[in-house]
Image: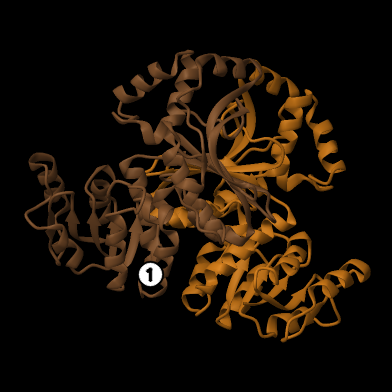
Chain colours: A brown, B orange
Amino acid sequence: MRIAVVGAGAVGQAVVELAEPYGHTVTAVADSSAGVVDADGLDAEAVLDRKRTEGTVGPQTLDAVLDSEYDALVEATPTTVGDAQPAFEHVRTALGRDRDVVLANKGPVAQRYDDVRGMERDSDGAVRFEATVGGAIPVFSTIEDIGAENVTAVRGVLNGTANFILSRMTAEGVAYEHALAEAQDIGVAEADPTFDVDGTDAALKCAILANVLTDTTYTLDAVEMMGIRDIPASALELAQQGGSTIRLIGEVDESGVRVRPRLVDEHGTLAVSGTQNIVQVETTHAGRVNISGRGAGGHETATAIMSDLRQLEY
Amino acid sequence: MRIAVVGAGAVGQAVVELAEPYGHTVTAVADSSAGVVDADGLDAEAVLDRKRTEGTVGPQTLDAVLDSEYDALVEATPTTVGDAQPAFEHVRTALGRDRDVVLANKGPVAQRYDDVRGMERDSDGAVRFEATVGGAIPVFSTIEDIGAENVTAVRGVLNGTANFILSRMTAEGVAYEHALAEAQDIGVAEADPTFDVDGTDAALKCAILANVLTDTTYTLDAVEMMGIRDIPASALELAQQGGSTIRLIGEVDESGVRVRPRLVDEHGTLAVSGTQNIVQVETTHAGRVNISGRGAGGHETATAIMSDLRQLEY
């Protein structure tokens, strides 16, 4: 497929890099300040090189990218809450032109799911968003396989940064601030870790899962949310004495949608370590299916985008 | 879809039961001695009831079932090795009539993969076989998602019976014979457990995985195989002292295809307990993806068949 990539951070860059080996042609790329378009296909290496050395992908504009010829728009700008702009507008533009959309940005499907599905119904294009939850883990593809109507609940560790901090607090017996600083040092946590440690990122993912699984439209406001900032090292120590540990668990079930620290069996399936993610899907006829793997990272997330592109090709 | 089900054991019966709630119509069913056909759709409950009370599904023949009008043939007869008959002939008949085929029977894709793919190329029908490996776990769908060309290795616990026996030997410190007898008592192991405990069942599954992942055609003979019969309780005890346990692991990687007992971390991802299965998929760009769940059971296997039918509908 000919793809236009909007957003040139870690995920956008990995999409540009992997597109060709996966059989696609990148015809346009935009970052936050500029764009580059070539209907015959861009030279991925040249674009990435320019981004690295000059800080921008090219001499054109975002509008030129959005107006260019492509089959699928990959939306990989940073997630915003509220009205999910400007990502929502990018989705609207692409669907309005009957093009497909693949989201890495969580905003549009977490905050304006109904609007997105409505625009999709009026378009010949389709919207997919495997990359929004669980990084490399095929969460939505598995739910599609099982059939959303046969899924009774989903829960899991959906934020790798929070999980890394909890894992380090447990392994080293250190305080939250210490583990956070370590995570920031090695690039697992951002300078402003609020979204990850307060549960917002996991809550956005839960809202998306709830939107796929239920008939109600959820947004961040509808998710019960508690983060990991206030967990003392002593709580993890106590948990460990009882054969348990603490993980930040997101859950969607018949009683609601929530993200909160929970006691889990220290050797149990939910107690993944480091930046791993895990999703448990409860089904009507086949019990529980567990899927775990790398929950973040440019290449990992880009592979989920490649899966979506593959599905759109059929 | 209109489906014809050949084989009326636990899996075939579960397919007949689940078809309607999943939006399909069962138009024909055959067991080992008889068949029943109704182009307008059979009454699932009546068929299952007759099977239970009279031991047969109906008054017609297998040929009548194979000749009937259907969109997809579900092959759920017991797996045979060697020439994979009679399942292979059922596949040939259906593809010859340009119908789709969904396999629960491992034989045709484990023993005659090339032949099956060749017949598929000459047909308007397609062959899918999610149910042949890992029961309810979406193994092939995940590999399809990732792209077989991006998968470098697959390994896992692929036989629930052997895993149950090893789990019980570990938990209770009992000998193989004792754990086997317990498994037979509760219906987890068959009266003749050879296929499960000698590794044949897992090896057939590995052959199928290897066929999907490589360009070479594998059969059972090409799989290096060692079972669990000769593992003494003392080996499990020794393993446990070192923080490990023993699992029967099937592997497909660049160095070959094999099934053998292996030491694994006792709390590690591969050490699933009871009849659970787990599959680890190693990928080029996204690290390892783990999928675990119920590896056997009529309903569990039938849900994998329902996933295949859903894919065929697109």
Q: Does residue B44 appear left or right of residue A200 in this picture?
A: right
Task: Determine whether the residue tagged by mark 1 lies in a helix, strand or loop.
Answer: helix
**What residue is drawn where x is 42% and y is 43%?**
B254
Q: Position of residue A12 (x, y in %)?
A: 25, 49
Q: Does residue A6 appear left or right of residue B44 in this picture?
A: left
The relative height of residue B49 versus residue A105 in the rendered view (above or below) is below
**What residue is drawn where x is 44% and y is 30%?**
A162
Q: Does residue A277 appear left or right of residue A2 in this picture?
A: right
Q: Position of residue A76 (x, y in %)?
A: 29, 51
The relative height of residue B239 versus residue A74 in the rendered view (above or below) is above
Q: Which corner quadrant of the image does residue B48 belong to?
A: bottom right
Q: Which corner quadrant of the image does residue B242 belong to?
A: top right
A126 or A269: nearer the eye?
A: A126
The answer, for residue B146, to whether it is visible in the render is: no
Chain at tag 1: A
Q: Which corner quadrant of the image does residue B229 belong to?
A: top right
A127 or B35: nearer the eye?
A: A127
The relative height of residue A18 versus residue A23 in the rendered view (above or below) is above
B279 or A298: nearer the eye?
A: A298
The answer, for residue B246, to whether it is visible in the render is: yes
Q: Position of residue B162 (x, y in %)?
A: 71, 39
Q: Position of residue B244 (x, y in %)?
A: 61, 23
The amino acid beneath tag 1 is Met
Which residue bears the numbered disc 1?
A119
Mark 1, Cα crowd under 10 Å, few <14 / some 14-19 / many 20+, is many
**What residue is drawn where x is 35% and y is 31%?**
A193
